[in-house]
Image (tube, helix red, strand yellow):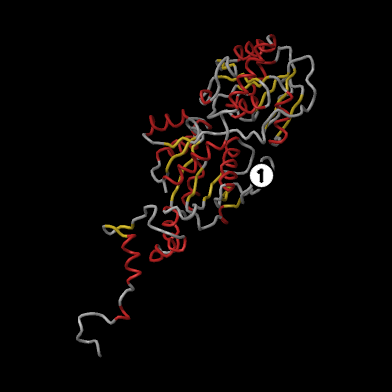
Amino acid sequence: MKFKNLKVRPKMMLKPKRRIGRKSRLVKNGRKDWRAGSISSQSEGYKAGWKDGYRDGRWIAVVGGVCKPKIAYVIPGCSISGGVAVILQHANRLKQRGYDVVLVSLDGNTQVSWHPVEVPIVTESRAPADRDIVIATFWATLGAARRIEAKKRFYFIQSDESRFYSPSSEQSKLAYQTYKTNDFTFLTMAGWLQRWLQRTFNKQAIYIPNGLDTSLMYEAEPLAPKGNKVRVLLEGPINVPYKGMSDAFAAVRDLNCEVWCVSSSGRPAASWRCDRFFESVSYETMKHIYSSCDILLKMSRVESFLYPPLEMMACGGVPVVADVTGTDEYLVNHYNSLVIPNDIRSAANAVQSLIADKSLREHLRAGGSETVKKWEWDRSIDLLEQALIRNV
């Protein structure tokens, strides 16, 4: 052969100089250099990782700031809950900023009728395989989050979910174990949770505070005109014991007021005093219910953030809240609310003081109005974007 005794390969077998130049920008000490600025276009980002396949090429483009990551949130289901409402806000607002976001529902339901949703919801079997980031949102979603193909995994922790069950139950133990996992970056929405994760598990969690959507929650037309009696609202799933609804009904039993109740699960017992009852209502309806009432009483024994008191403030009412984890996020006793010990007598006395003292109600209403202004969603989504990009 003509080239048999030559010590160099023929020109046609040499790598083009342009290709060598590209590699020299991306390889340093045997490792790819993924720093921003190493890629000048989306096309170049894909080509840079072609050796290892589409996903690596796309990841280089994401890290280089050429394109935004594709995100999947894994949710336990589509039923009414404050935790799912927060995730819907994340997903909707990330989409509005140009992200490709999908929700993966694990209960087989892909329809949300109680809250605005702007992104697709799919079952796990239909989860897309092109995600850059997957975010688990409940202890029981970690397994599915691991099964979905992605380059980076986050765990959005909205409570110590082991407390949702009997301490000796298998579910409680499994939930607790998830906070020891090492293959997810932790996010959380409450300062107390961030401190608890650090103290208990030596885990650093990125704080993404919740927000309030004032386009959904604001003082609106009451469902019924307010009369001479002060109207007290009790809100929470009656069938969930730790939400304290039986204690709340006991606290208002002998007070001179109207009692309204909203429950996403369960109905009041026949012996409980209730002038008007609502079950599994939408966000659209909730603002009218809040605006119909003067006082909200919450006596939960397990909480992480407590959205209803903030929503009540936005609708012109005053919350009375039993002291529980999460109250320190925004509730300030005698400024925007009454924060009380978690017992029936303290709750009854606090509500009675507000019934009797209109000037105190007006003082707390004013504090609540100022509080609401500080909890806009934009700052939270700014921090969420920074967390997702910083950790890619």
| Location of the N terminus (image quadrant) | bottom left
The single residue placed furthest to the bottom in the displayed view is 1
Q: On screen, 143 above or below 353?
A: below
Percent from the top left, x then y, of residue 263? 68, 30
State whether residue 204 is above or below residue 232: below
Is 390 in front, or is 263?
390
Q: In which quarter of the image is residue 52?
A: bottom left
Residue ID for mark 1: 112
Which secondary structure lies at badge 1?
loop
Above or below residue 104? Residue 240 is above
Q: Nearer the viewer, residue 65 or 278?
A: 65
* Residue name at image x 37 percent, y 52 percent: 35
* Label 1 Cα neighbours within 10 Å, binned few <14 / some 14-19 / many ≥20: some
| The quarter of the displayed image where residue 268 is located | top right
Residue at x 59%, y 52% (from the top left corner): 123
| Location of residue 7 by image quarter | bottom left
Q: Which amino acid does label 1 sit on?
A: Val
Count of picture labels: 1
14, 257: nearer the viewer: 14
Where in the figure is residue 381, as x and y percent of width and height? Answer: 53, 40
Residue 109 in the image: state x and y as whole percent: 64, 48
Q: Which residue is drawn at 44% across and 32% down?
A: 194
Indicate left or right for 259 with 345 as reference: right
Vertical position of residue 224 compared to residue 380: above or below: above
Counting from the top left corner in percent of width and height, residue 93 is at: 58, 43
